[in-house]
Amino acid sequence: MSEKVVTLDVRQDLSNGREPFSKVMGVVAKLQPDEKLRMIAPFEPTPLFAVLGNQGFSHESKQIPSGDWEILFTRHGGETTVFVPPVCPPCSAAKTEPVQIVDVDARGLEPPQPMVKILEAISNLPEGAELRANTERRPMHLYAQLEERGFVGETKEQEDGSFITQIRHR
């Protein structure tokens, strides 16, 4: 039996300033149990490893001669899972005013540096405080990382096209 591989190249999306997370998750949702995903990206998408790992995928990544990265995602046991994005409107109903607000400006950084900067900042976030991160893109890869660390985040697009993500302890 031959190996079935679906290839997704996200380099153009990223160079045009588009976040490819929903595109990746759409392709993953359509994968047949015997199919693998081969993704090509300009950087190693380490946040995606945890997201897809939680859905039963392992990965092998390697840098290719162009300097880009090729990642092969393989499903364990042929199980099909459906991605359900984190939903936080119930969180906002239970919000109390933060005792401290920490602002992080992660604009002007190439992925995955905005997420790295935000995760570093929340590692020192006091209980009851809120982190407000300003980014140029909606931080789709960040939500799973926040959840794993006991945080919730809610992102709103600003009039200038940037995004503010409010992050709190769960």
Image (tube, helix red, strand yellow):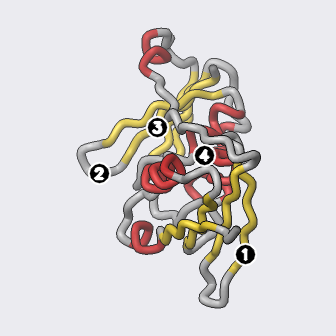
- Label 3 – label 1 distance at C-alpha: 31 Å
* Residue that appears at 40% across and 67% down: 13
Q: Camera-side residue: 22 or 99?
A: 22
Q: Which amino acid is tagged 3? A: Thr
Q: Is residue 68 above or below residue 115?
A: below
Q: Residue at x 47, y 26 (%)?
A: 87
Of callouts 1 and 4, the N-terminal one = 1
Query: In the image, is residue 103 above or below residue 25?
Result: above
* Mark 2 vs 1, N-terminal side: 1
User: Which disc, if any, is residue 165?
Assistant: 3
The crowding category of the residue bearing disc 3, from other C-alpha atoms within 10 Å (few below 14, some 14 to 19, many at least 20), is many
The residue carrying pointer 2 sits among few (fewer than 14), some (14 to 19) or many (20 or more) residues within 10 Å by Cα, namely: few
Label 3 or label 1, whichever comes before in sequence order:
1
Instruction: Give left or right: position of 82 versus 58.
Output: left
Q: In the rendered image, which residue does mark 4 sit on?
A: 118
Q: Amino acid at mark 4?
A: Ile
The mark closer to the camera, 2 or 1, is 1
Q: Is residue 105 visible?
A: no
* Label 2 element class: loop
Task: Return the x and y of residue 65 as percentages of the image width and height.
Answer: 66, 90
Residue 56 screen position, x and y as percent: 71, 44
- Contact flag, marks 2 and 4 (Cβ < 8 Å): no
The amino acid beneath tag 2 is: Gly
